[in-house]
Amino acid sequence: MANEIKFSTAGFRGMTAEIVTAQSIQRLSIAIAEHIFTNPYYGFEGAGYKKHLAARSLKFKRPLVLVGHDTRFMSDKFADIVCDILASKGITVKRAVYPLPTPVAEWAVLKEGAVGAVVITASEADYTQNGLKWIAYYGGIANNEIVQDIEKSIPSLSSAPRDLPEFGYQNSAVGNQNLRDAYLAHLTTIINVKAIKKAGLRIGADPLFGSAGNYFRKFLTSCGVDIEEINGGSNALFGGKVPNAGPEALKDLSALVVKKKLHLGIACDSDCDKFGIVGPDGDWISPNQIAPVILEHIIKNRNASGRVCRSIITTNLIDEVARAHNMPVRETPVGFKYISELMMSGQYIFGAEESGGIAVSTHIPDKDGILACTLVLEMLAMEGKNLKQIFRDFYRKYNTYYDKKVSISKREIQIAQIMEKLNLNPPLSINKTSVWRIDQTDGFKFILRNGSWLALRPSGTEHLIRIYAQAKDPQTPAKLISEAQKLIESLS
């Protein structure tokens, strides 16, 4: 049935050859084509898309869709299916020559005026997973309204074409396009390349065998950066690691930075929507640590002004930076699509989420790990300081916040029961501190009287309960996490 295929916050995703199969990609491609031709706002004849094209003085006789894939096992084959089906429906299809990062696809959609793009990827998931992301004409991941429209159009197994598509697209209407070089040329217009060229930076880069491998070296060498790259080839198993740009995945990069005495290490997950930073001592720097510093940089050195937004479980240090510059802050549910909606308004200069997503107003409305990494390099170059000095100066002005995050695996029914019990009987005191306010925008965020907070929410992609904590002293987050774990077990 159609409801067998469901989107999460990260698009359609599942186990390769079990959930993500030639048939499920076929059915989903048919639904995307139906959405393109029938949706009254986001489709080819839709009011929103027509207004979007008119503002850019563009007009098409047929819908244009871009198609690409990451470096995962079967990704290129699944992209073949998408190309063939969309082309057979009368849609003009341009397929990316190189493995395609999601943010590059989003930028290309805006540049080309396409009605949308398909990227075959499971983002930061392990090698057993794959999936599909639909990018709408506005250059961001499909919003809830679009997702619902596509899901209702997915043909059932009984009504879907019986013959599975062959791998290797045959339709002559499918054209190939080099989206990489155009994107990198665009980066030079929004990054201070001149400052980077003068800085003499020595950088370690780890694409984690993902699509960043075609981008990091080409761009950084053009900026005069001395780059040491690892894990830049092809490896369907991602070297036995989960390609999420987290501390475990970047141990090799940390060792490289220390061994070669580099200024910094940069990394992206497999489709480049999230990023990772390793400091000169080999320490992994969390997004909650680096995002406020990047915000300070774009305000101070790039003269940005406007509003700021962040997800509900992202550090409050972003609020401190924004308030110091008289900028309002908006809090969103978890899921970057909510931040993207605000970025599209044109009022917001910066959006961030704790899992490694950053957006800035001079670029696409969605997160871009490649841009985030280059912004950190630009910051070093424009400040004329190493990362240690930048953090030292930053914390002379702002408070230090400490964060901790863990996940607990539970069955789907258990997660639902735990959330329902929390709703009926939430704790009024945590870690011997009274709860001042409970925010249920996304799960439960318990804000305590002393300013620390604890959040619990179901994962949007896995059968997990995510637990987050933040405080101004280093010991409290671990204590709050421990309290949350005990609470969850008592409700199981």
Image: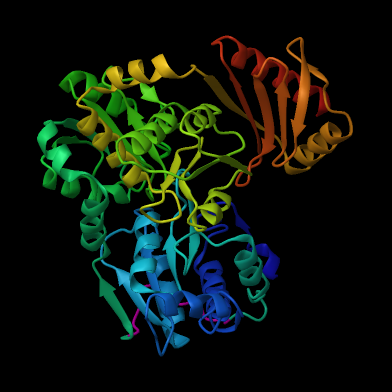
Name the side, left or right, on which 403 lies relative to 233.
right
Residue 169 colored in magenta in the image: yes
Residue 43 lies, with reference to residue 409, above or below; the image says below
User: In the current view of this chain or complex, which residue is farthest to the right?
Assistant: 424
- Name the residue located 28 percent from the left edge and 28 percent from the top edge: 253
**Of residues 54 and 485, the one drawn nearer to the viewer in this rendering:** 54
- Colour scheme used in the picture? rainbow
In the picture, the quarter occupied by the C terminus is: top right
Q: Main secondary structure of the magenta part?
A: loop
Magenta residue span: 161-171
Name the side, left or right, on which 487 lies relative to 376.
right
Name which quarter of the figure residue 305 lies in: top left
Q: How many marks?
A: 0
User: In the current view of this chain or complex, which residue is farthest to the front?
Assistant: 326
**Of residues 227 and 74, the one drawn nearer to the viewer in this rendering:** 227
Query: Residue 380 at x, y = what percent?
Result: 24, 30
- Name the residue located 70 percent from the left edge and 65 percent from the top edge: 3
In the picture, the quarter occupied by the N terminus is: bottom right
Residue 79 lies, with reference to residue 224, above or below; the image says below
Query: Residue 184 at x, y = what percent?
Result: 23, 55
Q: Can residue 231 be seen in the rendering of this structure?
A: yes
Q: Can residue 166 be seen in the rendering of this structure?
A: no
- Name the residue located 73 percent from the left edge and 12 percent from the top edge: 431
Residue 372 lies, with reference to residue 93, above or below; the image says above
Query: Residue 204 at x, y = what percent?
Result: 22, 32
Query: Residue 265 at x, y = what percent?
Result: 27, 30
Residue 420 lies, with reference to residue 6, above or below; the image says above
Residue 104 colored in magenta in the image: no
